[in-house]
Image (cartoon, rainbow, N blue to C red):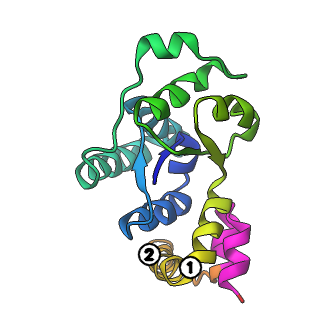
Amino acid sequence: MRMFLDACVLYPTVMREMLMGVARAGVFEPQFSPRVLEEWARATLKIGPEAEVFARSEIAMLRVAWPRAEVLPNAALEQRLWLPDANDVHVLAAAIAGSADGIITLNAKDFPRNILAEEGLSRVDPDGFLHQVWQSSPEVITDVANGVLQTARDLSGKDWTMRALFKKARLPRIAKALSQ
């Protein structure tokens, strides 16, 4: 299964690490476009210039880890497509160009299901996607989550709980599932 990742799920870090960890486990093939990666890098500027440098190094590592994941949208395809937010048309075009099965995004209103269905795509939020994986392969999610939790503890110096970390990362269903 190929899933196109919108910029809003690549930044923040915990969400990205969960999704990419599940991809590393072979659950899905991630896809992204150069523009999505650039949006992620620019979004980190809110934190400061060091954050952008870190994001760009993370982007370089993603490109190395998944050399076939980067897809370019076709300009003619982009021109025929419509979404409520014209700035998101490139995401839809890239997902189509990459023969993705769906788009993982937090922006439900910008990706109406009926428009995506016309292109043979689905839309899923990251928490819902990860929860579906947890339902079929709880060990995959548990292993990835334990690694993400340990990294968060190591980097922040805080003694995060699983539930608190994943709730803060806007993954409440996974937080609840992993806390049971």
Q: Which residues are magenta?
A: 163-179
Residue 4, image x, y percentages = 49, 43
Amino acid under disc 2: Thr
Return the residue at label 1. 158
Q: Quadrant of residue 109?
A: top right
Residue 19: mark in rendering: none
121 relative position to 57: left or right: right
Amino acid under disc 1: Lys
Return the residue at label 2. 151
Residue drawn at point x = 50 percent, y = 25 percent:
93
131 relative position to 152: left or right: right
**Pick the front one: 152 or 177:** 177
Rendered position, 176 above or below 180: above
**Pick the front one: 20 or 53:** 20
130 relative position to 150: left or right: right
Q: Going from the N terminus, do you reach mark 1 or mark 2 first? A: 2
Most common SS among magenta residues: helix
Residue 16, image x, y percentages = 49, 57
Task: Indicate which label's residue lies in the foreground, 1 or 2.
Answer: 2
Figure quadrant of the C terminus: bottom right
Can residue 49 be seen at all in this image of the molecule? yes
**Pick the front one: 2 or 41:** 2
Check the image and name the residue furthest to the bottom.
180
Figure quadrant of the N terminus: bottom left
Residue drawn at point x = 62 percent, y = 60 percent:
129
Mark 1 burial class by Cα count in 10 Å: few <14, some 14-19, many 20+: few
Residue drawn at point x = 41 percent, y = 24 percent:
73
Residue drawn at point x = 41 percent, y = 42 percent:
52
Distance from Cα at disc 1 to Cα at disc 2: 10 Å
